Image (spheres, grey):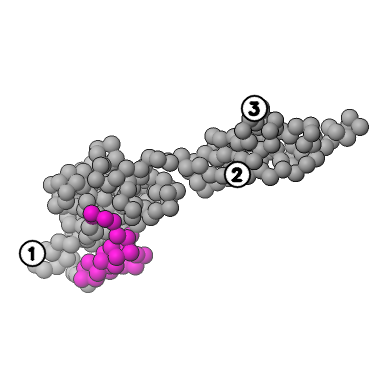
């Protein structure tokens, strides 16, 4: 009888206890609906819930003797690591450089933080200051406006379409000027770095259009990674990434 009980306990522990969680969320987890008196990672359950379990961690659930052989409902829920960490766009400061502006007008520490709040991340703050023809600063879109390439004449139209599907209150999208790009790249590759660190799409090692027109009426374009300005035929087709003035 004692041997059977041990076997049942071993089965229960193997069935319910060794659980590896592989979550896409960037946060911690909780297990709820745990019966009173069960042991979770060596700690007796008091209120039916254990929190602070890191993603992909090993969790050991040990049932009480009276629950031996019974199947209990064990529920894993995701708790956002960033919960309560957003601020209003009007309240940004130097501490929020590299944070992500979302379509709801809030600013989050990371793309995943915005998504956890069920809002759309649209741009990463890359410059703060009013010198760049903006009230507070500039942010660069978290992704190109499209996978397509555009001529200089079509680039502003692409940004307009992007703006209509990614509106942000009290902010405006535009095709970046040469000065916009320089402001956002005060340090080498600065805008490139903040995009990656915020969880946005890496800027391609490629040419991107600016809104400037050269004195001989050719378009001006910008090799983003190396901070180089070129001018050439407006019919060339290059990438477009919008900036957000706020």
Mark 2 → mark 3, Cα distance in angstroms: 17 Å
Could you tell me residue 150's position as x and y percent?
28, 69
At x 91% / y 32%, what residue is drawn? 1
Is 125 on the left-hand or right-hand side of 77? left
Ranked by sequence position, the earlier of labels 1 and 3 is 3
Q: Is residue 21 above or below residue 162?
A: above
Of labels 2 and 1, earlier in sequence is 2
Question: Foreground mark, 2 or 1?
Answer: 2
For mark 3, give the secondary structure: strand
The residue under label 2 is: 76
Q: Earlier in the sequence, mark 2 or mark 3?
A: 3
The kind of secondary structure the magenta stretch mainly shows is loop
Instruction: Report crowding for label 3: few under 14, some 14 to 19, many 20 or more residues within 10 A (C-alpha).
Output: few
164 magenta-colored: yes
Q: CA distance from mark 2 to mark 1?
A: 62 Å
Q: Residue at x 88, y 35 (%)?
A: 4
Task: Identify the residue position indicated by label 1 in the image.
Answer: 215
Quick one: which residue is furthest to the right in this view?
Answer: 1
Residue at 41% x, 46% y: name it.
113
Magenta part of the protein: which range?
A: 144-171
């Amino acid at each position: 009888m004692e041997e059977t009980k041990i076997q049942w306990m071993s089965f229960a522990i193997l069935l319910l206890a060794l659980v590896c969680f592989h979550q896409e969320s960037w946060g911690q987890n909780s297990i709820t609906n745990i019966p009173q008196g069960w042991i979770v990672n060596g700690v007796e359950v008091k209120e039916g819930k254990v929190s602070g379990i890191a993603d992909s961690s090993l969790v050991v659930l040990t049932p009480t003797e009276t629950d031996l052989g019974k199947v209990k409902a064990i529920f894993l829920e995701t708790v956002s690591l960033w919960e309560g960490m957003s601020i209003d766009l009007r309240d940004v400061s130097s501490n929020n450089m590299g944070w992500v502006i979302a379509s709801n007008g809030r600013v989050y520490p990371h793309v995943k933080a915005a998504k956890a709040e069920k809002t759309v991340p649209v741009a990463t703050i890359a410059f703060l200051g009013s010198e760049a023809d903006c009230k507070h600063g500039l942010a660069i879109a978290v992704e190109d406006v499209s996978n397509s390439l555009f001529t200089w004449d079509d680039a502003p139209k692409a940004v307009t379409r992007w703006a209509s599907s990614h509106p942000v209150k009290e902010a405006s999208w535009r095709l970046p000027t040469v000065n916009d790009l320089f402001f956002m790249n005060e340090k080498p590759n600065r805008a490139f770095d903040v995009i990656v660190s915020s969880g946005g799409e890496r800027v391609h090692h490629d040419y991107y259009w600016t809104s400037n027109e050269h004195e001989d009426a050719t378009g001006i374009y910008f090799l983003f990674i190396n901070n180089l300005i070129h001018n050439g035929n407006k019919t060339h087709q290059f990438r477009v990434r919008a900036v957000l003035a706020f």
